[in-house]
Image (cartoon, rainbow, N blue to C red):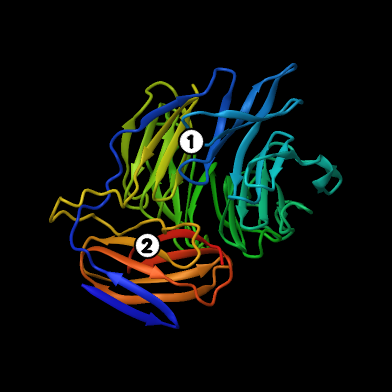
């Protein structure tokens, strides 16, 4: 069945292919690489299935020094790009393809302006925080393309830039004078994430803070005597924070409110090390006992997979819709491929349990981009394109469609080059994929 829709001058082609089997993430994580013993890896990021970076430390003359490593083959091999010369380590890294990126840690911030090909150390003098020069232990960095970035650290320092790091605005996140004495306030910031260009949240010991002006002014959104030290987002609406003892909160309104999902597990001897989500339903937690927990319902229920018993994981991440990856304290790097379009078409009458949206293809694109999606049953669904500012560009369609595989095509005839988000929504679910339009 072929159905053409023209909406606001935008040509949309929806094709129903019939019923096929939906995605179930693979049961097995594959060991792909082991970093040499000299490296202690703390975080990993990938921009696609091939390009990735890892940060951490390696022994130096008088203690550890920060390092950045790079892979161009999906993690099969890694080469060292940066080795610092002073006592330091790196905690987090973010890279936007072809443009900006930062790696941050103890006393150190490195930046790239060519998509991670080369890196330069940012002088400490760029961070002037009141009477103090430089940042301490920078825990987390977030980037909203092309040039907006935010860094948070353990002294409750927040540094933000809107010009790609040419200038940084530094502030200490402290309670206002009229803050009640009996209410908690965050005393250590561990993580920061963007929902959209002007909307972020940061979490840590004592709760969650939020901003709607790109990081210039912050306010408390949730207070609780727990250390919410890790977080994940699916822009522009969904977010999760989790404590070391697996207490999980979820937001479905860009951080305005937070829903308590309880504890993932009850064993206090196990600690959560990291969390990541591919979309509003599919996510992972890695733990100190060598397990990776998986959810397919947005965090309501979880399934444990023992990967490296007795060896703690330190990081888990994802290339949405394509790949999940994790690294443990022994430097063992694991991957899990789950491209939703690589689904056996010969299996009939088996439906997924929830909606799936594929990455756009091609990406980047010039003339048009295509998304495939799978519906588990007949339902009302709509597809909308948003820009980097979170503004609606075009609603491609809104219709009741049958179960099965469908396709939608976008031809951005009146849009400029840049990053856009394809958002597929039903009454209860939201799937998002990012694409780059090159005019």
Q: Earlier in the sequence, mark 2 or mark 1?
A: 1
Q: Is residue 389 above or below residue 168?
A: below
**What residue do we see at 63% from left, 42% from top?**
116
| Residue 126 relative to residue 81: left or right | right
Q: Which residue is mark 1?
A: 73
Q: How many marks?
A: 2
**What residue do we see at 34% from left, 45% from top?**
338
| Residue 140 relative to residue 127: left or right | left
| Contact, mark 2 vs mark 1 (Cβ under 8 Å) | no
**What residue do we see at 54% from left, 19% from top?**
36
Image coordinates of residue 3 in percent, x first then y, are: 27, 76
Image coordinates of residue 400 in percent, x first then y, are: 26, 75
Q: Between 82 and 50, which is closer to the camera in this rendering?
A: 50
Image coordinates of residue 259 in percent, x first then y, are: 43, 56
Q: Secondary structure at mark 2?
A: strand
- Tell me how far mark 2 sits from mark 1, CA to CA: 25 Å
Q: Is residue 78 above or below residue 236?
A: above
Q: Quadrant of residue 134?
A: top right
Q: Secondary structure at mark 1?
A: loop
**What residue do we see at 31% from left, 65% from top?**
407
Asked if residue 265 shows in the view, the reply is no
Looking at the rendered image, the quarter that the N terminus falls into is bottom left
Looking at the rendered image, the quarter that the C terminus falls into is bottom right
Q: Which residue is mark 2?
A: 371
Closer to us: mark 2 or mark 1? 1
Q: Between 82 and 427, which is closer to the camera in this rendering?
A: 82
Asked if residue 307 shows in the view, the reply is yes
Residue sitting farthest toward the left: 349
């Amino acid at each position: 069945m072929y159905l053409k829709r023209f909406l606001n001058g935008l040509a949309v082609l929806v094709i129903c292919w019939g019923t096929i089997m939906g995605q179930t993430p693979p049961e097995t994580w594959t060991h792909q690489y082991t970093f040499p013993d000299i490296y202690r890896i703390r975080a990993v990021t990938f921009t696609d299935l091939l390009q990735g970076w890892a940060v951490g430390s390696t022994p130096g003359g008088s203690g550890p020094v920060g390092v950045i490593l790079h892979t161009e083959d999906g993690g099969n091999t890694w080469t060292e790009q940066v080795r610092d010369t002073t006592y330091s380590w790196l905690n987090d890294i973010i890279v936007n393809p072809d443009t900006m990126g930062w790696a941050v840690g103890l006393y150190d911030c490195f930046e790239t302006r060519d998509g991670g090909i080369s890196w330069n150390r940012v002088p400490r003098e760029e961070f002037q925080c009141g009477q103090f020069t430089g940042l301490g232990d920078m825990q987390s960095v977030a980037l909203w393309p092309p040039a907006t970035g935010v860094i948070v650290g353990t002294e409750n320092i927040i540094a933000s830039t809107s010009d790609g790091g040419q200038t940084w605005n530094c502030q200490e996140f402290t309670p206002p004078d009229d803050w009640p004495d009996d209410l908690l306030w965050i005393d250590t910031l561990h993580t920061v994430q963007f929902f959209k260009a002007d909307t972020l949240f940061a979490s840590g010991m004592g709760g969650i803070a939020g901003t709607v002006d790109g990081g210039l002014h912050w306010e408390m959104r949730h207070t609780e005597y727990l250390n919410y030290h890790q977080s994940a987002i699916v822009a522009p609406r969904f977010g999760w924070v989790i404590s070391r003892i697996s207490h999980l909160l979820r937001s479905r309104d860009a951080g305005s409110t937070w829903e308590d999902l309880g504890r993932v597990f009850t064993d206090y001897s196990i600690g959560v090390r990291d969390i990541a989500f591919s979309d509003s339903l599919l996510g992972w937690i890695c733990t100190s006992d060598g397990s990776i927990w998986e959810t397919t319902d947005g965090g309501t229920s979880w399934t444990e997979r023992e990967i490296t018993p007795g060896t703690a994981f330190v990081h888990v991440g994802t290339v949405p819709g394509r790949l999940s990856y994790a690294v443990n304290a022994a430097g063992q790097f694991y991957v899990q491929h789950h491209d939703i379009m690589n689904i056996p078409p010969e299996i009939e009458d088996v439906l997924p349990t929830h909606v799936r949206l594929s990455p756009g293809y091609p990406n980047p694109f010039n003339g048009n981009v295509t998304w495939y999606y799978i519906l588990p049953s007949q339902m009302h669904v709509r597809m909308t394109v948003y820009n980097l500012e979170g503004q609606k560009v075009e609603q491609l369609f809104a219709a009741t469609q049958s179960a099965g595989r469908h396709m939608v095509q976008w031809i951005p005839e009146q849009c400029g080059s840049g990053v856009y988000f394809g958002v597929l929504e039903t009454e209860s679910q939201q799937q998002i994929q990012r694409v780059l339009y090159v005019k």
